[in-house]
Image (cartoon, rainbow, N blue to C red):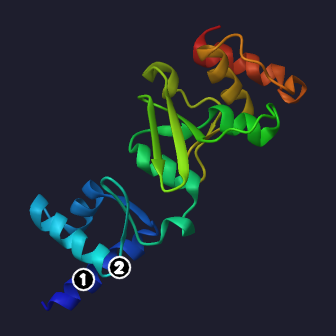
Amino acid sequence: MKISNIKQNRFLLLANLGESIFHVGDLSRIWNIKNRQNLSTTLNRYVNSGLMYRLYRGLYALKKVENLDPLLLGAKAINSYCYLGGETILLKHGAIFQQVNYFTFVGQRTKRFEIVSYKYYCRQLKDKFLFNDTGIDKTGKFNEASLERAVADILYVNPHYHFDNPKIINQVKLKNILQTVYNK
């Protein structure tokens, strides 16, 4: 098989997945390249020729970073189970008014990172709470907490957290999530 056919088949495989952001490990499995040096050389060639973009250490995309959803980018960069939560959800629903300069996720470990101009913060939550799906929407390209789940998570971490607009929080849903997830 000619080199150009190999390249064409590799990108056809990626296109058929409907994804645009990939980790090195994903690309290794998809393209069946087991040798790390060969994979690294291949990726460097694709980046240098403009076929792929290196976003972050070990993270590549088929589109320029400015053409990617910053929330999906953050979820993919975390590279383990996570969901959009915390202050990002509180701000989105109007429970807080102060601007937050980063996107917040909840995951298995605490992590702060930046990709180009986007800033991210992943707050660690114990597995027994993190993997409880109550109040988590899993229907989109990334998982997202409901307002009440985000409030419950914040209250677990900081019981004295101040909400600028507590009236919009459904207290029945919040109580159910606190009991189901945190046994409170």
Residue closer to the observer: 47 or 172 = 47
Q: Can residue 151 be seen at all in this image of the molecule? A: yes
Q: Which mark is residue 103?
A: none
Amino acid type of the residue tagged 1 in the rendering: Lys
Q: Is residue 104 left or right of residue 80?
A: right
Kindly identify which residue carries mark 2: 51
In what element is the residue under mark 2? loop
Q: Is residue 142 left or right of residue 92?
A: left
Place of residue 131 in the rendered image (x, y in percent of width and height, measured from the top left): 48, 28
Kindly identify which residue carries mark 1: 7
Place of residue 168 in the rendered image (x, y in percent of width and height, measured from the top left): 87, 30
Q: Residue at x 26, y 65 (%)?
A: 30
Q: Residue furthest top?
A: 184
Tell me the mark number nearer the camera, choosing from 2 and 1: 2
Crowdedness near tag 1: few (<14), some (14–19) or many (≥20) residues, C-alpha within 10 Å: some
Give the image quarter of residue 141: bottom right
Crowdedness near tag 2: few (<14), some (14–19) or many (≥20) residues, C-alpha within 10 Å: few
Q: Is residue 54 left or right of residue 39?
A: right
